[in-house]
Amino acid sequence: MMKTIAIRKLSTLASIFCLALSASAQHRVRTELAIPDIPGYLTLKCDFHMHTVFSDGLVWPTVRVEEAWRQGLDAIAITDHVEYHPYRTDVSTNLVRSYEIARATADSLGIILIPSAEITRAEPPGHLNALFLTNQNRLVTTDYREEVKIAAQQGAFLFWCHPGWKQPNGRSVWYPEQGEFHAAGFLHGLEIVNGNDYDPIVHQWCQDKNLTLVGNSDAHDPLDMVYERAQGELRPMTLVFASARHPSSIREALLARRTAVYSQNTVYGDTQFLSPLFSRSVDVKNPAVTIKGKGRIYLQVRNHSVLDFELKPAEKVEGIALPAKFLLPAGKTALLSLQGTTTTLSGSQRLQLPFFVDNLKVAPNQPLRVVFEVLVTFIPVETK
């Protein structure tokens, strides 16, 4: 009976592999994600939390690599569970095996593959992902504190996964155990986005406790079953601002908190990163304009990035009325309406037009403030 069940399970897994590979064969092209570099750093698109059949995922390790390549990523971590192996009768429980299988494909496609694992314990302390491990198998121990210590000894970057996952109403709770790991210097980051779920409580913790922002897919199914890429939906990503396209540079950037998180056309991160990210995405094609009296003119604003930007005025500007909302679509040029509010202004003025970018969040519920600098020549109009 057990043998029959095992054969059925293996057959089911094989069918899933074939479907995934068939889909890959039909769409084996890479979509480059236009997210600009910022001064001094490359912007690397990363996903540091996903699973394969070597824990509880439904795909082979090489599928995860090609998904990442097709979807425009630069680096991934396959974080199969240390403690949880539902397919143990069908595949190896060697914790290094999924990395070994995926490595050749990653190298051939230019995807940085980071050796990793997910420490999988009941709450507290919950689940912790350890990146940049030297030997995943050495994490196997009955004591989770020892497990975390071993990961730290291997130089791991450790982050807490989905803190609100099993909490009432999804409201995250900071455990004493997390405080213990943080105080010891073992805990470096928190997952503020898991799948399609953003956690503002955890985002605030990162700011209060000086921890790195991380956001990931936590993929178990084939990703084309989760995100509608044909409609332009992107997987969640950790944007890492690294000095070079290399694992050691990614690790350095993570430890230095140089990250932002993308999810559902919103990016979460510190002002020091989101401000240059926006300014390098957008430019005004006609920064010198003339307004006659209460007439209307248009700025042509070009968005070079893969992100839509949703803007609203941050404050009033003397002599000019700004639109209540302004959508700047990805990869397009949009017309920003400026209308004079008086007939008496004259001469040329350099103005800063202030906006909030609603989908760039520098803190929970706090949008990034940006300005467009323009030279406006006002021509007065005589009235009877």
Image: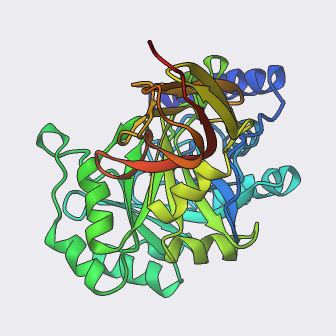
The answer to whether residue 328 is visible is yes
Residue 107 image-quadrant placement: bottom right
Task: Please state the horizontal and vertical placement of residue 350, each as a whole percent of the image.
Answer: 59, 50
Task: Please state the horizontal and vertical placement of residue 137, each as a whole percent of the image.
Answer: 53, 71
**Above-or-below relation of 115 to 375:** below
Q: Furthest-right residue in view? A: 108
**Above-or-below relation of 283 to 179:** above
* 77 and 275: which is toward the camera: 275
**Above-or-below relation of 322 to 170:** above
**Above-or-below relation of 35 to 330:** below
Task: Please state the horizontal and vertical placement of residue 45, each as a whole percent of the image.
Answer: 65, 51
Left or right: residue 174 compared with residue 104: left
Left or right: residue 360 compared with residue 380: left
Residue in view at x 26 percent, y 70 percent: 208
* 115 and 74: which is toward the camera: 74
Q: Furthest-front residue in view? A: 384
Q: How is the image coloured?
A: rainbow
Residue in view at x 69 percent, y 21 percent: 19
